[in-house]
Each structure stands twice: as C-alpha cells, then as structure tokens.
Amino acid sequence: MTTALPAKGRPSADVLADLKGFAAHDPNYKEGRLWSLVYYLDETYADFQGEAYREFSSANGLNPTAFKSLKRFENEIIAAVAEMLHGTPEVCGVVTSGGTESCLLAVKTYRDLARTRGVTKPEMVLPVTAHVAWFKASEYFGVKVRLLPLDKDLRADAAKLARLCNRNTVMILGSAPEYPHGSIDPIEALGAIALKRKIPLHVDACVGGFILPFMEMNGRELPLWDYRVPGVTSISADIHKYGFASKGASTITYRNLDYLKHQMFVYQDWPGGIFASPALLGTRPGGAYAAAWAAMQHFGKSGYRDLAKRTTQAFDKMRQGIEKIPELYVMGQPTGPLLAYGSCDPNVNIFAVGDQMDEKGWNINRLQNPDGLHAMITAIHLEVMDDYLRDLQQAVAVVKANPALANSGSAATYGLMSHLPLRGLVRQKVLDIFAQMYKAGGHDFDLHAPAAPEAGLKGQMMAVVERLAQWYVTRQQQRKSRR
Ligand SMILES: *Cc1c(COP(=O)(O)O)cnc(C)c1O
C-alpha cells in the first residue's frame, strides 16, 4: 500500500474528514478504555489546547532570542516547575519536546561534565526499572549502564548502590515513580550516597512530576524525591503527561547553572551563522510550548490538585479491587498514579487475562520480569473503574476455567517473548518486526497475523526460534503445574 502525493491538492475540508476517519481505528482513549500513552479530559479542553497550539504552531524556539514569546513561555514554565519541585531560586532548566529528550539531555550533560575531570569511559547507575529512554541514552551517548537491582518492593536497592559506583560513574538515576510498577525509588537514600561520592543524581519524574506534588498537597504521604533531597542535582518532568499539555512538552531542570551549562551546544564557525542550542532539537515547536504554558495557567495548583484527587481515588479503587481478586496481586508498593498486577495462581496466565480484557474492549499494556498487566491511571478512569474491575474479575474466571488460553492468542506470543532465555533472539525478532513496518512500502504489524510467506530464510529461522520458544514456555508451564 504505497500512496503517492496527490497530483492535485485537495480541499482542506476533505482532508480533515479523512483525518477524522483514520482515528476510528485508534484506541478508544476518549472513553477511558486505554491505560497508557494518552492523557485526555474532554473535547472542550482538547479544543482549548488546540487553540493555544495553533496560535504558535509556526513559531520556532530554535533561537531563543528571536521569539520573545516562546522564551517567555519557557522562563515561566521552568520557574513554575522549579517551585513545584521545591527548588531554590538557583534552579534553572529548559523546555524539551518530551521525556525522552529530557532523559537524553541529562546523560549528555553529565557525561560532558565528567569529561572535564578526565572521564573517558563514562558509566551510569540505573535501577532495573529505569525507563527505556535511559537505555537509549546509553546507546546514543556511549555511557555504559550498571544496573542497580531492586529490593523486595521493586524499588531501587540503595544498599547495593555504593559498590556499583566508581571513578567513571557520571550519574546515578532514581525514578519518581518508575513506569513499570509505579514505585518511587528511595531518593533520600540514593541522594545520601550520591552526595558523599560527589556523583550527580537525576530524578526521572517524567511521569510523576506533574502529579506527585499535587497528591502531596492533597495530604497523601509520599517519600521525598524532589529538590528537598540534597543529593538531587536534576529532575525531568513531562508537561505532556499529567500536566495535560498537547504532546511535545517536557522539562529538564538542574539544581544550578554549573550543571546546565554542560547541556549547551555552540558552533561558532558554521557558514549559516554562529549557532547555539540549549537542547537536542534544532527547530523547537512553538505550539507545544504555548499549549504547555496554557495548560499550566488553566489548571494552576487548584486544577492540578483536583485532577490528582480524582486520579488518586481511581488508583485506590483499582488497587483495592485487584487485591480483592484472590488470583491476582499488585506488584510492589505503588503510591499512584501507576500500578501493575500479576497472577499468583499457576492456573491463571496473566497474559491470557489481558487477552480477555482486550476482547471486552480494554487496551492494556503487558509487562515482563515478572509478567503482568499495567495501568497508567488518569482522572477520567474514575468513571470506568467499576466496569474495569467487573470485567477483570470475569476475565480471571474465564482464564481459570480454560487454562489452555495461555497457549493461544497474543498470550502465547507475549509469554514466548518474555520467557525465552535467548534474549538476543527476542531482540532480533523485534528488529525484524520493525524492519517489516519501516521498509519501503512497509505495513502495520499485527501480533495475531501469521508470518508473511515472503519472509525468506530469515523468516524461516525466526519460525524455528518461535517453535523453540514455544517448547520452552510449555515446558515451564508443565513444571509449574507439577509443583
Ligand atoms: C514517559 C516516561 C519517559 C519518556 O517520556 P516520553 O515523553 O515518552 O519521551 C521517561 N521516564 C519515565 C519514568 C516515563 O514515564
């Protein structure tokens, strides 16, 4: 299915009608059926964001001296975030296009800071649950990862941190909360070690940054994780998550300019002019900054507290509801707004439960190590929580009555991919899938579809791998049921 540029342009009304049509096949996030990726409230708010975005959709933040409006948005956003995170007046930062950009920048910054003291083989300590963006940063910037194991509650195990640090350690990471299970890492304990070893500590609050402060204001007891912890040197917080800004807005702040200055890029000899850039992008999307600023002004503390209150209610309801289903358990000690749950019954395959939920029209992410289902809870989920929990209870009952469901549908594929010990093969398989999607004339990938007949030798090899994996998973299941 290749589509050439239309020879003759089309009226905008036709094009817009097409766009609306395409969305029909996307996840149903407007009614709270999707449990990741999207932060949505209602059409009125979406229109408000759209309008703010449109006002500045052509504006470019590339050169912060050109568009005074954009620099103003950036200044005000960063100042508000610094206050929200209990920073001193020294805290400074940059608006970025998303959490990944913020994370990449932190790694670049700390690698370059360490270069000034002669570190040529940089390393960083990441908890096992660090967001994938950090592993991407490791690959992009050549900073070796040392993995910090988790404690029994799935938080970074601070007791094991010191022995992973050495002269090449350029930074330590903690998350507030981590994405997979919603646990807040013990930032105070990590901070004490970071301070003692004089190693920067970044807190990844990409997902938590715009909700935890308001949960705390509402009276929820949370461990300290922001600039109140002395060892914390920088924090990433996404506005396009719980800040409810249009996609394309995050922040990275640093305790002071001594850190931030290592993020800057300058090239003074370019024929196009002297070039300076504070972040990863060249052209920076003015619309996203305007929409983010507008979101923060619209909600203010009271609005965000209200959203946090509804989210917390939904979270508590979900947690209690899952704990009432004897075959399931909630992983770790999540404080909200995310959680994960798995099965504690050998006859209930959690991925098969996920398939049943899919059939009921829910859209839920799968986790591995350990196997589980995931929920990123927002305010609109409060309204669907009763339905969700009722369907979940039914899904568990169906799977329990039909344990063979574990070997069919996407449960089989997920099980296979997460349990195959040969991780290099899994990686290869995923790269293959992406190659199929992104090759010239590439197509959608459907987890349920059989392998393409034109897959060739490589495809046949992968089929062998799949059979091998299938055999391995079946054997594991047999062992488990014998126990
Ligand atoms: C979402 C997230 C990121 C990455 O942010 P993107 O905006 O998706 O690029 C990083 N860290 C954590 C903890 C996240 O939840």
Image (spheres, rainbow, N blue to C red):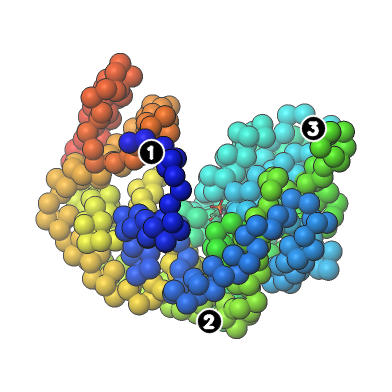
Q: Looking at the rendering, which quadrant does residue 266 occupy?
A: top right
Tell which of 84 and 153 is nearer to you: 84
Badge 2 density bin: few <14, some 14–19, many ≥20, Cα 10 Å = some
Residue type at mark 1 is Thr
* Precedes in sequence: disc 1 or disc 2: 1
* Image location of residue 416, percent across then percent down: 29, 36
Task: Provide the residue designation for mark 3.
Answer: 119
For the point 70% across and 54% down, the residue is 60
Q: Could you tell whether 25 is left or right of 225 in the image?
A: left
Pointer 2 residue? 306
Q: x%, y% of residue 293?
A: 66, 69
Residue with the mark numbered 1: 3
| Identity of the residue drawn at 69% across and 72% down | 84
Q: Is residue 384 left or right of residue 151?
A: left
Compute the Cα span from label 3 to label 2: 46 Å
Decide which of tag 1 and tag 3 comes sooner along the chain. Answer: 1
In-front residue for pair 287/346: 287
Q: Which quarter of the picture shows residue 465?
A: top left
Q: Amino acid at mark 3?
A: Val
